[in-house]
Amino acid sequence: MAELSRRAFLGRASAVGGLAALGACSGGGDGGEESAAQAAAAAFDPEDWASVRDQFALDPDTAHFAAFVLAAHPRPVAEAIERHRTGLDTGTQSYLAETEVDAEIAVQQAAAEYLGAEPDDIALTDSTTQGLGLVYGGLRLSPGDEVLTTEHDFYSTHQALTLRARRDGTVVRRVRLYDDPATTSVDEIVSRLMAGVTPATRVVAVTWVHSGTGVRLPVRQLADALGGRALLCVDGVHGLGVEDVTVGDLGCDVLVAGTHKWLFGPRGTGIVWARRAAWSEIGATIPPFEPSSFGEWLNGLPPEPANGLRFTPGGYHSFEHRWALAEAFGFHRDIGKDRVAERTHTQAAQLKEGLSGVPGVTVVTPPGDDLSAGIVCFDVDGSDPVDVVGRLAEAGIAASVTPYAAQHVRAGPSIVTTPDEVDALVAALGR
C-alpha cells in the first residue's frame, strides 16, 4: 500500500498542492533582486532569433547542426529540471506526493495543445525507441495479420517488428518507396506503399522524416489512400518540433516520438499519441501507475483497454526531466510553431541550394519543402562521410553520419543555427 500512497492517485484533490509546490521551489520569494538566470529569462524575446539562441548554453564557437541526434536544453527547460531536482533532493517524499500528479497532467496537457489532441490520448515514454517497442509489441494482431513497413525505416521500427515476429510469428513485409530520394514524388511514394497493401494488412508502420535521406513522407496522403483499411503508425521524431501541423492534419492513427531532439525537450523523454479508436487495438505491456489500473488490481478485475494514461509505463522515472517537458512545449509555443517551421525550412532550403553549387557535392534530400523537413543529407565525391564530418568539426561545425548501411553526411538546421552558419558550412565544403 505504500506504493499506492506514493502516487496519491486515489486523492486527486492533492493536485492543487502540486502547483503550489512547483511555485515554492522556483526561488526568489521575498522581492529581492532577480538572479542572473531570472533576469535572462525575463529578457527572453521569442520573436528575436538571437534571443532564442541565447536561451541555450551551447558553445558559441561551434555551429550546432546535429541537434536531431540529442538536443541541448533551453534555459526554461534547464531551470525546470533544476527546480524539480532540488525539490526531490530536499524533500523527496513530500515533493513527489505533492507534485507528481499535477506535473504529469501538465505535460500531457502541453503535449495535447501542441498536437491538437486530447490529453488522455497521450502516453509519456522515455524515447522514440521505447514508444515504438511498446506500440508494436502491444498491437492486438491475430494469426495471418500482416504489418507493412518500408525499407527506409530506422533500426528501432525494424527491430521492434522483428522481435514481435520472432515472438508470435507476425508477418512483417517491407516495401521500397523510392529509389532516388532527391527526385521522388508524392505520387511515387503513395503508389509504392499502396502496392504493398494486401487484404491481410492490419498495420502500416512508417517514419515521417527519414533520417537516412531526409525525405519527409506525405503522411496525410498516405492516410487518405489507406482510407482506414489499416492502422497507420508513424515514427514522428524528426517531424515533431519542426512541422507546424496537428495530428488531425496528419491523419495517422498513432504517432510516436522522442522529445529530446527537434523539440529541445529534456533528455530521456518521449510521447505516444493514438486516436481513441486506435488505443483499443494496442495493449499495455508495462503496468501503468494510474488510479483505474490500481483499482483493477486491488479489486481483482481484468485490465480495461488502454488509453494514454493506461499505456504510460509505471515505475520510478527521471522525474525532474519528465516533468520539465511541459516547459519544452511551452518554449516552442512561445516562439510559435509556424515560426519554428519557417526558420527550419528556410535554412534547410538555403543549405540544399548552397550545397548544390559546390563541385563534387551531391544533395540526397529532395529540394522541395513538400517532401523534406530539417534534415539535409549529402555526399562528397571521393570522401568517406566520416571524414567529411571530421573536416567540418575542425571548422567548428557539428554534423553527423547517417547510421544506415548506405551512409551520407547529414546536417540539421534548426532554431539554434543561423543563416550565416549555413553559409559557413557550405563554404567549408567548398575549400
Image (cartoon, rainbow, N blue to C red):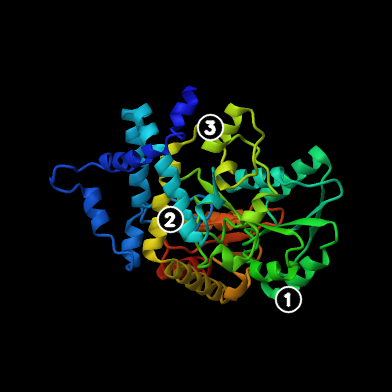
- Please determine whether, in this image, residue 287 is positioned above or below residue 420: above
Query: Circle 3 sits on which residue?
Result: 315
Query: Circle 2 sits on which residue?
Result: 329
Q: CA distance from mark 2 to mark 3?
A: 24 Å
Which image quarter: residue 377?
Answer: bottom right
Q: Amino acid at mark 1?
A: Asp
| Residue 424 on image: x %, y % | 45, 67
* Horizontal side of residue 140 vs 428, given as left or right: right
Of marks 3 and 1, the one in the foreground: 3
| Residue 192 on image: x %, y % | 79, 68
Q: Amino acid at mark 3?
A: Gly
| Residue 373 on image: x %, y % | 56, 67
Of residues 155 and 299, the one nearer the viewer is: 299
Sequence-wise, the earlier of marks 3 and 1 is 1
The structure residue drawn at horizontal position 79% and vertical position 38%, both measured from the top left corner, is 167
Q: Amino acid at mark 2?
A: Phe
Residue 89 badge = none
